[in-house]
Image (tube, coloured by chain):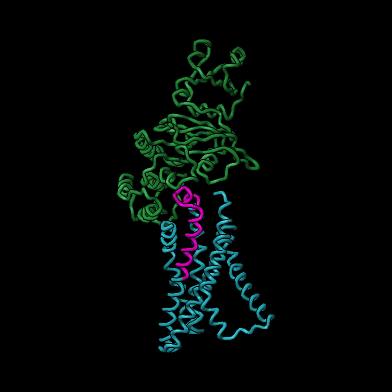
């Protein structure tokens, strides 16, 4: 699996400069004209979307077929994609945190106090969870429909988790459960676990799709 | 057991094509050439052998084991397709790192040596390499994990004769070790004529024959004759024939016998290309 992660990191490394440029442009736009918090989300989600780009690289070089003649199983290939996604989400969230903090301090939008820092850290964690959920939804879609169609379907990978969250929210409202700050905080703390469960479900789905495919 | 690769009754059905009960084996220390026209089923055979497509019927074993049964088996098999399977912005150095992380048997020094031997710059991006150099890089990767069996699918297609000759030399070097074997599919039959020990001919998804190259080269012949002589030929001796504008070309399995029997006929040696062409475009008497 190390080989698969290495391959994706080497491949995407070529796009790192343009991604960095986009993130810097967004930093100016968001931190200056919006708020630092949303910038962290943008960074995390944009980086998670790079997982679809790695599939495009694989398609153009017919890598997947080649990987299967190496001592790599189909399971490992799918796990490798999720591992790369976790790396992308982590790098994106941390990059967002660092730039947002620096930008926020420069523009006086955040202050160096414990509550503010804790809030930023919690937001970074939420951004990581969200990007992981969105990104992991796109993996089975790309395995099923290919990288080109997968790009178009990226919207679906954002809509489905959003629709599920909205559905749960509505259900809670129907049951008369009010989402207090305390419940929201508990949910946020549990969210990494939920994201990992979601990733596992998406992994199983991806593997089932990929297992049946002829290369 | 002498067979490194044993293919038995390999069958795969598509809506418009069927790979039909293909069987052959590759023995230790030999080069097996897989020939056939485009679309004959050579690549489908290789894909099925490598478990890249699902088989409908039949079995494939390497050293008596199924490919899916052991990861170690994949360490022993080097594969080269008709192009490089690494993204174009990677360099040979990075390719070495990726492959090195995948194979336990990877020999980084051997890979370096191959890069040097093939004059491949380690830090140049793949997209800036010529087709021949890309192919050499694929071969370097395939050989650097010390496989015992090389499977080559149209690995020399699209290369100029000099580059092809260089690559064929590498393959000949590889089989100097009597434990090594090669299965090589190609529609460039002259390449196989140079290096193959056995030839398996696939036509429309079926194996037409599997013979030693020497048998084809030294025994097979083509009788060139007119209509009158053609009518006198023993039809049991005709493998396949084709009528050109002015003459009949008749493939026979024993050219010396034909030369003695039909003194008025011209009996030429048959190249593998001639044999392939006659089987694909000609007709059979029975």
**Main secondary structure along the magenta-highlighted residues:** helix
In the foreground, B243 or A89: A89
Is residue B98 found inside the magenta-colored segment of the image?
no
Q: In terms of image quadrants, where is residue B148?
A: top left
The structure residue drawn at horizontal position 52% and vertical position 45%, both measured from the top left corner, is B51
At x 48% / y 50%, what residue is drawn? A68
Front residue of B99 and B104: B104
Evaluate whether residue B25 shows in this view.
Answer: yes
| A45 w.r.t. B67: above or below | below
Q: Which chain is green?
A: B
* Left or right of A141 in this view: B154: left
Q: Colour of chain A?
A: cyan
Numbered disc total:
0
Magenta region, residue range: A64-89
**Residue A4 pos. (x, y %):** 44, 57
Q: Position of residue B57 (x, y in %)?
A: 59, 39
What residue lies at 34% left-to-right and 36% top-to-bottom? B173
The image position of residue B113, as x and y in percent, is 30, 46
């Amino acid at each position: 699996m190390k080989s698969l992660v290495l391959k994706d990191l080497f491949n995407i490394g070529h796009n790192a400069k343009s991604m960095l440029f986009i993130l810097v442009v967004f930093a100016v736009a968001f931190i200056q004209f919006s708020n630092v918090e949303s910038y962290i989300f943008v960074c995390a989600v944009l980086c998670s979307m790079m997982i679809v780009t790695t599939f495009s690289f694989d398609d153009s070089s017919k890598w997947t077929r080649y990987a299967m003649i190496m001592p790599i199983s189909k399971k490992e290939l799918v796990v490798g994609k999720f591992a790369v996604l976790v790396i992308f989400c982590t790098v994106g969230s941390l990059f967002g945190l660092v730039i947002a903090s620096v930008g926020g301090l420069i523009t006086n939008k955040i202050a160096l106090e414990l509550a503010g820092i804790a809030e930023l850290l919690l937001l970074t964690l939420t951004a990581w969870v969200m990007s992981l959920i969105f990104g992991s939804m796109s993996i089975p879609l790309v395995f099923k429909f290919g990288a080109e169609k997968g790009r178009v379907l990226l919207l679906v990978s954002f809509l489905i988790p959003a629709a599920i969250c909205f559905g749960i929210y509505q259900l809670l409202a129907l049951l008369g459960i009010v989402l207090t700050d305390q419940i929201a905080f508990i949910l946020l703390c549990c969210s990494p676990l939920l994201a990992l469960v979601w990733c596992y479900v998406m992994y199983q789905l991806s593997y089932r799709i990929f297992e049946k495919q002829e290369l | 057991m002498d067979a490194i690769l044993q293919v038995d009754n390999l069958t795969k059905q598509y809506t418009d094509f069927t790979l039909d009960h293909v069987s052959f084996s590759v023995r230790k220390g030999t080069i097996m050439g897989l020939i056939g026209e485009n679309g004959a089923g050579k690549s489908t055979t290789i894909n099925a052998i490598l478990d890249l497509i699902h088989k409908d019927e039949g079995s494939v074993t390497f050293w008596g084991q199924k490919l899916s049964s052991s990861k170690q088996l994949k360490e022993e098999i080097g594969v080269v397709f008709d192009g490089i399977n690494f993204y174009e912005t990677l360099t040979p150095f990075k390719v070495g790192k990726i492959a090195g992380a995948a194979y336990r048997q990877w020999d980084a020094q051997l890979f370096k040596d191959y890069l040097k031997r093939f004059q491949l710059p380690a830090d140049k991006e793949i997209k800036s390499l010529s087709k021949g150099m890309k192919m050499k890089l694929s071969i370097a990767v395939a050989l650097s994990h010390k496989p015992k069996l090389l499977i080559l699918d149209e690995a020399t297609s699209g290369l100029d004769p000099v580059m092809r000759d260089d690559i064929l030399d590498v393959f000949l070097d590889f089989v100097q070790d009597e434990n090594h074997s090669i299965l090589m599919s190609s529609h460039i039959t002259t390449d196989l004529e140079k290096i193959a020990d056995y030839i398996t001919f696939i036509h429309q998804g079926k194996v037409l024959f599997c013979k030693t190259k020497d048998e084809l080269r030294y025994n097979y012949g083509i009788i060139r004759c007119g209509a009158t002589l053609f009518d006198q030929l023993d039809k049991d001796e005709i493998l396949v024939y084709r009528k050109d504008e002015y003459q009949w070309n008749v493939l026979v399995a024993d050219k010396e016998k034909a030369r003695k029997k039909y003194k008025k006929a011209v009996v030429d040696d048959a190249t593998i290309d001639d044999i392939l062409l006659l089987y694909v475009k000609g007709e059979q008497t029975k």
